Amino acid sequence: MATPEQFQSDFARVVSTSFSFLTAEFGFAAIQVEPWLVRYRSDALIVDIYRDERSSEAGVIVGLDKATTPESSNMSIGRQVFEDQYSLDEILEYRSPKLDDPGLVGSAFVGSLADANVWLPRLAAALRTYGRDLLTGDAVTYSAMAERRSRAAHKFMAAEKLSAARRAAQVAWQLKDYPAVISALEMIRDQLTPVEHKKLHYALRRTNSR
């Protein structure tokens, strides 16, 4: 069985072979090789191919070099992703209406060299086919993906607000705290179910009758 150090070396080697198109076709150069991370750079763009040591997830991040946009931190997925950087999973989701290949993957479990030999070439092929405009810094694509991410964030926050209001209303209903029921349900009045409408009307009657 390979030692962890040997596996790290093998991972970098498979990355170099699988992602050689970054250098040959897009002018990237490998500028950083660390345990479980190989970074390529071209002008202000970077490509990170990483393996998360805790989960064994391997993935790809593409976008602006954070050194050129130090103020734009955003969220974490395996590694830190900045506002103008996108995971291969996100790229494939962005392309999904036009994709008909259910075997496409943007990340994969890589627990061994055998896994690396199977999955890293598939990640590379997906990036080469569906990430070309990001690799060339196409402003229209970056703008569209930023807008898509913003819409997803707003949708997530709205769903969280809706869920929290319904939990609060349910607890208040069980406690017969009708002012609290009203407060919770009024926040989501345009999204109430028929049952929630009845609860709100009942709570209003009970509160107004006092």
Image (cartoon, rainbow, N blue to C red):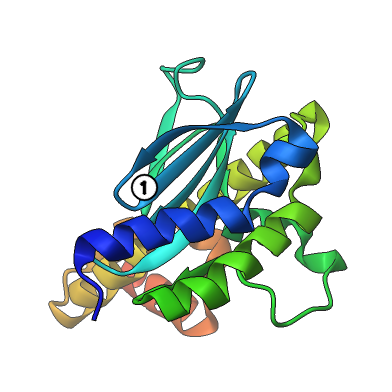
Q: Is residue 75 above or below residue 117?
A: above
Quadrant of the rendering where the N terminus is positioned: bottom left
Residue drawn at x 59%, y 60% as measured from the top left: 89
Point out residue 65 in the picture as x, y percentages from the top left corner: 52, 25
Q: Quadrant of the C terminus?
A: bottom left
Towards the viewer: 131 or 18? 18
Residue at image x 19%, y 75%? 171
Query: Is residue 118 toward the left or the right of residue 92 in the image?
Result: left
Residue 182, visible in the rendered structure: no
Instruction: Name the residue carrying label 1.
Output: 79
Q: Position of residue 77 (x, y in %)?
A: 40, 53
The x, y position of residue 97, in whole percent, is 82, 67
Residue shown at 71%/34% (left/top)?
Answer: 142
Give the total number of marks visible in the rendering: 1
Is residue 95 at least partly visible in the picture? Answer: yes
- The residue carrying pointer 1 sits among few (fewer than 14), some (14 to 19) or many (20 or more) residues within 10 Å by Cα, namely some
- Whether 159 is drawn above or below 29: the answer is below
Q: Secondary structure at mark 1?
A: strand
Q: Is residue 103 left or right of residue 50?
A: right
x and y percentages locating residue 22 in the rendered image: 68, 42
Depth order, front residue of 146/135: 135
Residue 34 higher or lower than 159, as above or below: above
Q: Name the residue rendered at 29%, 49% in the picture.
A: 35
Could you say which quadrant of the image residue 139 lies in?
Answer: top right
**Mark 1: which amino acid?**
Arg
- Residue 96, image quadrant: bottom right
